[in-house]
Image (spheres, grey):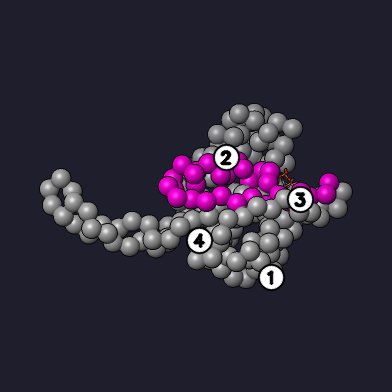
Amino acid sequence: MHHVLQHPLSSHVLTHLRDRTTKPATFRTLSHQVGLLLALEATKDLPTKDVAIETPLEPMQAPILAQSLVVVPILRAGLGMLQPYTDLFPSVSVGYVGMERDHDTAEARSYYCKLPPLEGRRVLCVDPMLATGGSAIQALNVIKEAGATDLRLVTILSSPEGVSALESAHPDVPLITAAVDRELNDQSYIMPGLGDFGDRLYGT
Ligand code: PRP
Ligand code: URA
């Protein structure tokens, strides 16, 4: 259950994100741009309900959003994908899950969690990179334990290994991603990838 975003602007932005000469300020702008395209894709089936309004010319029944949204960025790199949701969705709530990969073993460790009520709401967990899948799988475990049932994962780059791991661990969670790359290297980096997203986003 994974969906790869098909949009020429997304491909264009991704190319500049991958480019090693792209500096952090531009990298942040590009992350916001592809994050916005992904946010639209991940929410295009949100339910609506009709309400009565009056235009300047006549009364009408018109649709408004019927389900509220929770976005959960995985710290720290997921913060680079947050702003499109807070810009677009008037009543969005934001939760946070902190996960960090050990540099030697690539195993994810949870260091923070703060979530709003999740029952009955569309929950989008956002993290730019799905590499081994360890961080996302653990974050989704935590989010499910907190009560989420309508849950999706949104990433910018994914590896085939991460997609398989996610589909085994959470077959009920659709993945929306901008690209699935070739493979992981022996340090569990996505190839050809874009390097360490968090470091490039924050210039560390
Ligand atoms: C990166 C990325 C994901 C994770 C993906 O975070 O943002 O959370 O790696 O790798 P995985 O699928 O193998 O778990 P990192 O651990 O580098 O932390 P950061 O966001 O603080 O930079
Ligand atoms: N995390 C990153 O930031 N990049 C990768 O390629 C893999 C994990």
Secondary structure, mark 4, is strand
| Residue with the mark numbered 2 | 31
N-term mark: 3 or 2 = 2
Which residue corresponds to the image point at 68% horizontal and 33% vertical from the top-left?
Answer: 202
Q: Which mark is residue 122?
A: 4
Q: Residue furthest front?
A: 117
Mark 4 or mark 1, earlier in chain: 4
Which residue is rendered at x = 43% and y = 61% of the image? 67
Residue 167 in view here: no
Task: Answer few, some or many: residues within 10 Å of disc 4's Cα (few below 14, many 20 plus, some between 14 and 19).
Answer: many
Q: Give the residue number, with chain letter if any, for mark 1.
A: 168
Cβ at disc 2 under 8 Å from ligand 1: no
Whole-Å distance between the Cαs marked 3 and 1?
A: 24 Å
**Amino acid on which disc 1 is placed:** Ser
Look at the image and give the residue range highlighted in magenta. Answer: 75-103
Point out the frontmost of discs 3 and 2.
Answer: 3
